[in-house]
Amino acid sequence: MTGRPLVDALLPGWMNGQRWFGGKGREIRATRTMVAPIDTGDFTDEPPVWLHLVTVVYADGVEHQYFVPLSVHESADDSLDHAFLGVAPTDDGKQAYVYDALRDRGATTFWSRLFASGGERGPLRVVAEPDNAFPAGVSGDVLGTEQSNTSLVYGDTAIVKFFRRLEPGRNPDVEVHEALRPLANPHVAALLGYATCSLTGLDGAATDASDDERATVAMTACFLPVASDGWSLATGSVRDLFAEADLHPNEVGGDFAAESHRLGAAMATVHADMARVLPTGHGNRQWLTETAGSMRLRLATARAIVPELAEHADAIAATYAAVDRLDAEVNLQRVHGDLHLGQCLRTATGWVILDFEGEPARPLAERRAVDSVLKDVAGMLRSFDYAARSLLLEGQEDPQRAYRATEWATRNRDAYCDGYGEVSGHDPREQFVLLKAMEADKAVYEAVYEARHRPTWLVVPLRSLARITEGDAP
């Protein structure tokens, strides 16, 4: 089958059901699709793959573009029911069974050959790092923790992350990994390569776009098969605590504080290396005022989406106003931008930090800008709260459990800051006004996310905001 699948009618409904689609809860005015076939070479047993760049136009005029590779089969494949979009006609008068190509194992082999060799294929341009040892000719398996992206594991050596929402310019995840690669920081996985796509090179248009006009569609790094993610380890520790009704966190065998301390120390070394090889700067009184202003704008936008924020709005605004009154110089540098326990893996030798792309819902230019390292510290402090409080959602309200969850979160937040401060030489809690504001800003962001994606979790950031905006320190 060589005809183009006419899938425009299938895409909007299917995309709205995907975890990576960021437009849930927003009114969609229209969608536009650009399409390009991918030449799979001599591998005729692989299903044809078509790249779709889907532009979603919302009612407020905002447009987002998504990367959607689809595979086409001449007949239904029962083993791919989990990846099925539907049946669509083709422009040569045939009928196509259309699947998500990243969940179609037969269609994933193409990417392994491309990342092993590099080069160009249609609108794609792939850079393979020297001696990347990517396993060519094998199929990829989807990693189960899909969120804003889709990741495939190839064998036990490589993982490929596909960025679903695209913007022109290099993705920060690639930019940071490429800059850090020569330093061989043990807390960052080695970059193996990345792929970009011309956003104007589909449907027969020219493909000679500059790097600034191309979008990063995928990156690959070394896979760490024998590792546990920080979220699973932390929530396991909380479960151990809840199983012991009369013990404090430091008295439970599953106490996580030592790991939190090591994680803080690891992140301090990553920040130090990022400052060595990426842009840095200094924030003055004007930067602080602009930062507080941006936080206020995000709060105003969030209140329109999450009415429950109104109860906390005055306290949050006062937290931001305290930043306005600061008169200090703040060191600025590139940061992770979306740091939480799920972005950290514990290996046999230590912690490894993943996913330096920042918050996907924010514009690319904002994610690539320099910021205070406190943004990352605030993200991790929020994550400890999430780990402690997420288990409270599983049953009825229990005041004793809520108290013990707070005790666990406080112990691990302090341990993380202790570890970070010992390595960096600067305890982040010393800048409590800015740290508290950044933590509140992160909780507001989380409230919008939960309202759109997981409404039953909305209570977590809302309850945290009461704590964050009280007292003098996070």
Image (cartoon, helix red, strand yellow):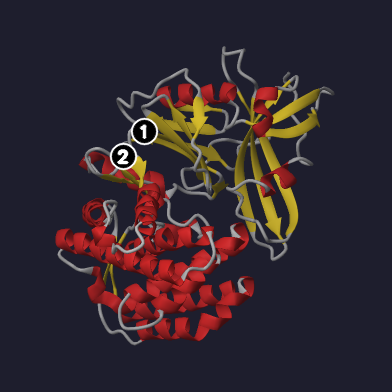
Question: Disc 2 designates what residue?
Answer: 189
Q: Secondary structure at mark 1?
A: loop
Identity of the residue furthest to the front in this view: 246
Vertical placement of residue 323 versus 68, above or below = below
Horizontal relation, residue 72 to residue 232: left or right: right
Amino acid carrying label 2: it is: Ala
Q: Residues within 10 Å of mark 1 (few under 14, many from 20)?
A: some
User: Where's residue 257, x and y in %?
Assistant: 25, 57
Write the residue at 26% across / 75% down.
431
The residue depicted at 24 percent of the width and 37 percent of the height is 348
Where residue 210 appears, x then y in whole percent?
48, 43
Count all numbered tags in the image, as a single digit.
2
Residue tagged 1: 223
| Sequence-first disc among 2 and 1 | 2
* Quadrant of the drawing holding the N terminus: top right
Q: Does residue 371 show up? A: no
> Are the residues tagged 2 and 1 within 8 Å (C-beta)?
yes
Q: Position of residue 266 (x, y in %)?
A: 23, 51
Q: Nearer the viewer, residue 248 or 288?
A: 248
